[in-house]
Amino acid sequence: MTSAMYSLYDNLTRKKTYDTNTLYVSELKRCLNVFDLTILGIGSTLGTGIYILTGQVAHETAGPSVVLSFLIAAIASVLAGLCYAEFGARAPRAGSAYTYTYVSVGEIMAFIIGWNMVLEYVIGTASTARALSAYFDSLINFTMKNFFKEHLPLHSGIFSEYADLFAMGLCLIITLLLTIGIKESAVLNSVLTAVNLIVVTTVIIAGLTEVNGHNWNISPNEIGNITNSTMIIGKGGFFPFGIEGTLAGAATCFYAFVGFDLVATAGEETKNPQRAIPFSICLTLLVCSIVYCSVSIVITLMVRDLL
């Protein structure tokens, strides 16, 4: 019985090893460079959070100090990113955190993390597709929603009101594009990321024309004159919810940086992964940090009712 338990323990904690002579040999085509990986990281990190999370944290948790919240979250993300960078250089294989856990901790933890990653990407893809469908539907006066609710209703308390075929179609199209090849997918990702960055940059530049420095120094006497739909009002100043609000906001803002780890999943398709993966992760976090902080500054200086 004891030997069986030891055998089970050994099987659960065994680590995967790679031959140093074949560590960089891959059956996949190594065609991605630093630019491709960086755009891949930015595209996966700079998602819907920048359009929703910034205003929500500024309004409900941190006020103007959301800028510091993003800065604190960025520092924490860099620490995590450096770990990914080191693992990516030492074990440039597909799998990201699954592979890193397999070679350093053991099989059972790698199994758990691997399936968690699958769950993460499935839920993330479905949520993003559904959000995009909702945004597009709002532009056409909710025509799709009304049609699907009438013809494809889901009478369940835990699912959506209707089957969103548009969101499902988006997922299928992206899946087909991924099957064509990693290089072609990287080109499409570069185009979409460029569009995203152009939109964000336009918002920042346009917002700079409407900034008001007084928003960062609103006195308590002025708070009564500020109205909004949720009636969540701080105490004024740069820290309307105190330092506690800033730190609580940082915890929420950290989720805005989730996505840079996608760079590490392309380890077997990267040219010179020892250099490209660490460099791309650092560039991704740098660009996203600048964008998040810039948007936070502009929004809090422009929209008074958020504070």
Image: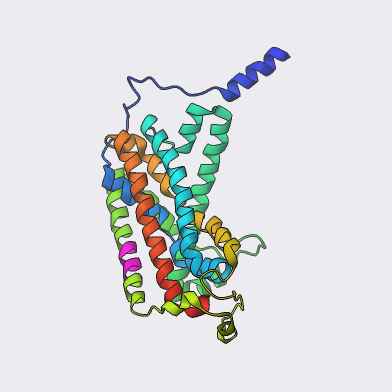
Does residue 153 appear to the left or right of 131 in the view shown?
right
Where 168 sits versus 241, above or below?
A: above
Check if residue 200 falls in the magenta segment: yes
**The one of 148 and 244 positioned closer to us in this rendering:** 244
Span shown in magenta: 196-202
The x and y percentages for residue 185 are 31, 49
Residue 238 in sight from this viewpoint: yes
Residue at 50%, 32% in the rendered image: 101
The x and y percentages for residue 280 are 33, 45
Which residue is the extreme one toward the right? 1
Where 48 sits versus 96, above or below?
A: below
The x and y percentages for residue 303 are 46, 78
Colouring method of the image: rainbow
Residue at 35%, 25% in the rendered image: 23
**The one of 27 and 30 positioned closer to us in this rendering:** 30
**Which corner quadrant of the image does residue 20 belong to?**
top left
Does residue 236 appear to the left or right of 21 in the view shown?
right
